[in-house]
């Protein structure tokens, strides 16, 4: 066989490998890609979410980004991993906390119906934090771990749980909205996107942590990058807030441990990249909080940073597309 024929054979074989469409929709960015069964990512695109005209501008954006990918890879099905609350069984967003246009929230949106009308392929819906834990379990090194918890630190704070080998849902098909567990009921500093003070998400999601600190310090333009840079230059004030952050994250993890008893916790999302500034504190504090819960069953989990970088939601969406539709 000539070299050329071999090359064309190889190309044809590659074409035959089935791929699905994966979309990860967050409160800031949207990612889309074609993904094959082994988790390889093709033609990934990332953009800021178009919130300019409610759900209409988002659907137009999804159509523009995804139709070329569907065509190129002859895709027949896909899934959307989205920030919640949402119902994966009906494909609806249920007044998603971090999706707002002109200050107004979206209410109930039949997002999967809308997307299917534009893309003409079968689509499924999953919570983005659930997708993140499914990615770690399905494509990651954590395949063998039956009790796994993922904390995503991005625009919001999401938690995905696998217990006894199964994805954990809350009642009414909803996802456990653990980001809105109140860490301090008397708090009047940390304002959450849900309108309450003191939620875990209000002080632990990268976006809220930075925005609320900017308010407290009278620096409205403070960014996460600024904060990390100052801490890396040994600025006392910045180092101190990261230690406090680490300690609060431990209190949140403690609540997760007594509820779900994970053997391992993975931290993912944009803010996980600055783990060196807070994770040592978190580990020490968590071990101390769980002090009396280490006899009989040792409830102290091991903790690591996701190897998927910011692609856990995207990979989880692919896992859902392969396994549910
Ligand atoms: Zn909240």
Image (spheres, rainbow, N blue to C red):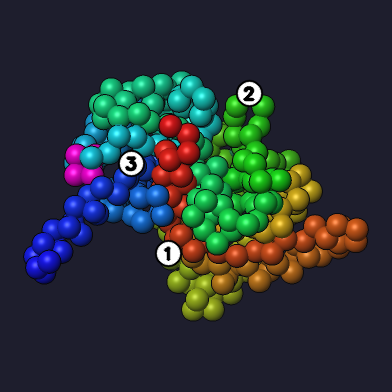
Q: In this picture, is 117 found above or below 201?
A: above
Disc 2 beta carbon < 8 A from ligand 1?
no
Residue name at image x 46 percent, y 44 percent: 319
Helix or strand or loop: what does disc 3 sit on? Answer: strand
Residue name at image x 77 percent, y 61 percent: 300
Q: Mark 1 points at which residue?
A: 225
* Res 59 visible: no
Q: Mark 3 points at which residue?
A: 21
Q: Name the residue under label 2.
A: 172
Q: Where is residue 163, by image quadrant?
A: top right
**Cβ atoms at labels 3 and 1 below 8 Å apart:** no
* Res 291 visible: yes
Query: Does label 3 or label 2 sit earlier along the sequence?
Result: 3
Q: Where is residue 176, by image quadrant?
A: top right
Relative image position of residue 152 (x, y in whole percent) = 54, 51
Left or right of 169 on screen, residue 22: left
Relative image position of residue 256 (x, y in whole percent) = 71, 48
Q: Using the numbered discs, state the Cα–Cα distance from disc 3 to disc 2 in whole angstroms.
A: 27 Å
In this view, the residue in front, 284 or 10, is 10
């Amino acid at each position: 066989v000539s070299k050329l024929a071999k090359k064309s054979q190889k190309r044809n074989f590659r074409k035959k490998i089935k791929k699905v469409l994966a979309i990860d929709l967050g409160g800031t960015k949207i990612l889309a890609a074609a993904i094959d069964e082994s988790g390889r990512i093709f033609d990934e695109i990332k953009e800021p979410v178009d919130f300019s005209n409610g759900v209409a501008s988002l659907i137009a954006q999804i159509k523009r980004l995804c139709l070329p990918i569907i065509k190129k890879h002859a895709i027949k099905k896909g899934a959307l991993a989205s920030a919640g609350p949402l119902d994966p069984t009906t494909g609806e967003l249920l007044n998603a906390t971090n999706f707002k246009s002109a200050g107004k929230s979206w209410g109930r949106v039949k997002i999967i119906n809308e997307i299917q009308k534009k893309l003409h392929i079968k689509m499924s819906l999953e919570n983005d934090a659930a997708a993140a834990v499914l990615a770690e379990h399905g494509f990651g090194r954590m395949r063998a771990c039956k009790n796994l918890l993922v904390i995503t630190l991005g625009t919001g704070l999401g938690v995905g749980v696998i217990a006894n080998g199964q994805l954990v849902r809350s009642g009414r098909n909803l996802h456990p909205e653990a980001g809105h567990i109140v860490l301090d009921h008397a708090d009047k500093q940390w304002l959450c996107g849900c309108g309450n003070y003191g939620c875990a998400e209000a002080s632990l999601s990268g976006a809220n942590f930075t925005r609320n600190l900017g308010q407290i310090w009278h620096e409205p333009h403070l960014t996460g990058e600024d904060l990390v840079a100052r801490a890396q230059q040994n600025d006392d004030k910045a180092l101190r807030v990261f230690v406090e952050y680490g300690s609060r994250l431990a209190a949140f993890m403690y609540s997760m441990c007594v509820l779900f008893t994970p053997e391992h916790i993975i931290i993912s999302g944009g803010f996980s990249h600055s783990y060196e500034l807070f994770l040592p504190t978190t580990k020490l504090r968590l071990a101390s909080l769980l002090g009396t819960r280490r006899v009989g069953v040792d409830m102290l989990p091991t903790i690591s940073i996701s190897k998927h970088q910011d692609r856990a939601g995207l990979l989880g969406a692919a896992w859902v597309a392969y396994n549910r539709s």
